[in-house]
Image: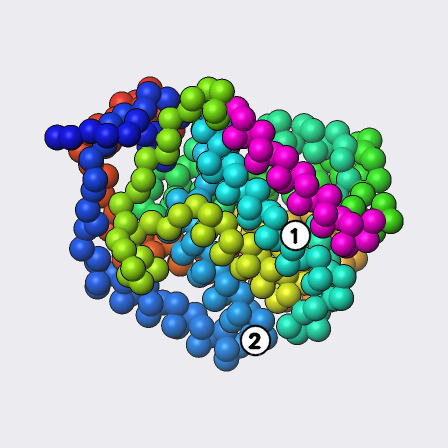
Amino acid sequence: MTTSTRVQPVNEVNDPVYRDTTALNAPQKALIAGGIAVAALLTVYLLATQHIAQTVLLGIGLLLGYTLFHARFGFTSAFRRFMSVGNGQAMRSHMLMLAVAVTLFAPILAYGYSFFGTGVSGYVSPVGVSLVVGSFIFGIGMQLGGGCASGTLYAIGGGRSVMFITLLFFIIGTTIGAYHLPFWTEDLPAFEPVSLATSTGLGYGGAWLVSIALFGLIAWITLIIEKKKRAPKMAPLPTTTGWKRIFRGSWPLFAAAIALAVLNALTLMTRGTPWGITSAFALWGSKIAEFFGVDVHFCGFHHGVELRGHPRRLSRFSRWRLVQVHQNHDGQFLGIRCRRLADGLRRAACVRLQHRRIFRRHRFI
């Protein structure tokens, strides 16, 4: 066995190892055909029963899941890798994704471009006690659980059954949180929401320049720290060459970052708001609770956001928006699953042994 560059497994943060080149397994064609058939059935059902926007969102969700898994694009792992060993490659891909996103979002929000005339708006929320407490707890949880919201979905779609535990408690937590959401968002101290574009007088052009400068600064800082720590490189994942790489093998992180930003912009123009994850978990949990006879309509989240003031019945607009969220996430999961079956990625024996050792030590990868 020959060794070359000191590299870091993509899901690892310590103890860089030497690895061989690896090959792709043969695609599981029967399961791929089944996944495509399910996607086709969902598409036909949505075309027959829902607004065309739902079909578009399903397609975007499929592509989001496909992209996330194709590049192993993680949010939790990027921060963990940077904090642990100083490797900032994934962090820089995040900055690229955000830079492309704000470049696309600025004209969309400024001129109100949308596909179905729904109007567009960004997520502008206040900084307050709820944000500080929630982000701190979430940071702990996503490290212990091994993934954030999108990471949990693409890991399950990729066949990591252990992540079902994380998803289960994600759903439980967001459902409980929906009950007392007004306490955190209305009763606790918080500053007024601030938009760089509309609250500061900079306009969308000025806000874009400030955002680009900030993302560039963060990327530059990661390079400085990476050089200072002499961080190990990320291990290259198995892939193929040429046009086949679109369907099999891994994409570069930077290619995935651009694709995710474009898909996020398409989501904004389709449903009027950007790509979001966790609200779908609250919806799933509430539907399960309602199935077992629990009246969820009195919860702060449903009453304040989804019921539009009606104590018992969702408005037509709210039902449409909730279905949008649901279909977008169903598409992500299905896209990831189809991608996983087609890929057949296989690590070398030395890396598998290394990962088993780390899993026993940390209980998460």
- Asked which secondary structure carries label 1, the reply is helix
Q: Which residue is under mark 2?
A: 52
User: Can residue 80 be seen in this snapshot?
Assistant: no
**Mark 2 or mark 1, earlier in chain:** 2
Q: Which residue is under mark 1?
A: 102
Instruction: Answer with the quarter of the image where residue 271 lies.
Output: bottom right
Q: Amino acid at mark 1?
A: Val
| Residue 211 included in the magenta stretch of the image | yes
Q: Nearer the viewer, residue 113 or 49?
A: 113
Region of the chain picked out in magenta, as a range = 202-225
Q: Nearer the viewer, mark 2 or mark 1?
A: 1
The residue at the point 84 percent across, 40 percent down is: 192
Q: Nearer the viewer, residue 352 or 206?
A: 206
- Image quadrant containing the N terminus: top left
Q: Main secondary structure of the magenta part?
A: helix
The location of residue 343, given as percent across then percent down, is 27, 53
